[in-house]
Image (spheres, rainbow, N blue to C red):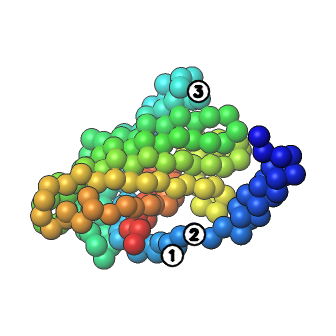
């Protein structure tokens, strides 16, 4: 049995160590890779499901520009969203890119958009909203054949999104 004073001392040591904890490795750096400009159709509203207001937004095309990748967004993908009360929107976008060299790249992009209920409503009604009024972050993953774009399978990425009335801009960064 552990004596009460010893137990109190162990608890204090754990709290002190948590307060002074440092990462065991250097903070990862982000390297800008490219921006995807995704053209979208008007939302299709499903209604209440999965804990919020569910909707689908078809992807109609777009472009990819940046130092690591250029190309186009192929039409036919989509963004499945659930808008929860309190301003959290869960996002799941799936679509294909076609690199300038012809390579087709599958994108699965999961993320969240967080805003006040008023800003969430303005975004849902396709109004122009300053990106400083909401948090829109995703973690894209890429499926691609072996070849010049295989590096996309071998890295982790984070992205910041900006919602416009007729498109979404996604700045993609490779975590170094």
Q: Horizontal and vertical percent for residue 59?
A: 34, 45
Calculate the distance from the C-alpha at mark 3 to the C-alpha at mark 2.
Answer: 36 Å
First along the sequence among labels 3 and 2: 2
Q: Quadrant of residue 12?
A: bottom right
Q: Nearer the viewer, residue 40 or 143?
A: 143
Provide the secondary structure element on which disc 2 rests.
Answer: loop
Provide the secondary structure element on which disc 1 rests.
Answer: loop
Q: Horizontal and vertical percent for residue 20?
A: 71, 69
Residue at the image point whose x is 24% and y is 66% from the top: 151
- Count residues near mark 2 (Cα–Cα under 10 Å), then give few for <14, some for 14-19, many for 20+: few
Residue at the image point whose x is 38% and y is 54% from the top: 140
Which residue has dot 2 on it? 23
Which residue has dot 1 on it? 26
Residue 165 visible in image: yes
Q: Horizontal and vertical percent for residue 21?
A: 66, 67
Can you tell which mark lies on residue 5? none
- Which of the two marks, 1 or 3, is nearer to us in this view? 1
Q: Nearer the viewer, residue 108 or 121?
A: 108
Q: Are marks 1 and 2 in contact (CB under 8 Å)?
A: yes
Query: Eyeballing the image, is 30 above or below 49?
Result: below
Query: Eyeballing the image, is 86 above or below 170?
Result: above
Q: Nearer the viewer, residue 17 or 160?
A: 17
Left or right of 156 on screen, residue 152 = left
Residue at the image point whose x is 86% and y is 46% from the top: 4
- Which of the two marks, 3 or 2, is nearer to us in this view? 2
Q: Are marks 3 and 2 in contact (CB under 8 Å)?
A: no
Q: Quadrant of the N terminus?
A: top right
Left or right of 76 on screen, residue 164 = right
Which residue has dot 3 on it? 51
Provide the secondary structure element on which disc 3 rests.
Answer: loop
């Amino acid at each position: 049995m552990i004596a009460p004073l010893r137990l109190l001392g162990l608890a204090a040591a754990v709290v002190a160590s948590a307060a002074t904890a440092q990462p065991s490795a250097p903070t990862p750096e982000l390297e800008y890779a490219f921006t995807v400009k995704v053209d979208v159709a008007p939302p299709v509203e499903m209604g209440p499901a999965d804990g919020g207001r569910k909707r689908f937004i078809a992807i109609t095309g777009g472009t990819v520009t940046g130092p690591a990748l250029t190309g186009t967004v192929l039409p036919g993908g989509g963004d499945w969203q659930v808008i929860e009360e309190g301003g959290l929107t869960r996002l799941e976008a799936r679509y294909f890119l076609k690199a300038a060299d012809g390579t087709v790249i599958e994108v699965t992009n999961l993320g969240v958009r967080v805003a006040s209920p008023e800003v969430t409503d303005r975004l849902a009604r396709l109004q122009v909203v300053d990106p400083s009024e909401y948090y829109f972050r995703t973690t894209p993953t890429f499926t691609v054949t072996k070849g010049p774009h295989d590096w996309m399978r071998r890295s982790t990425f984070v992205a910041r999104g900006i919602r416009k009335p007729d498109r979404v801009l996604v700045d993609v960064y490779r975590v170094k």
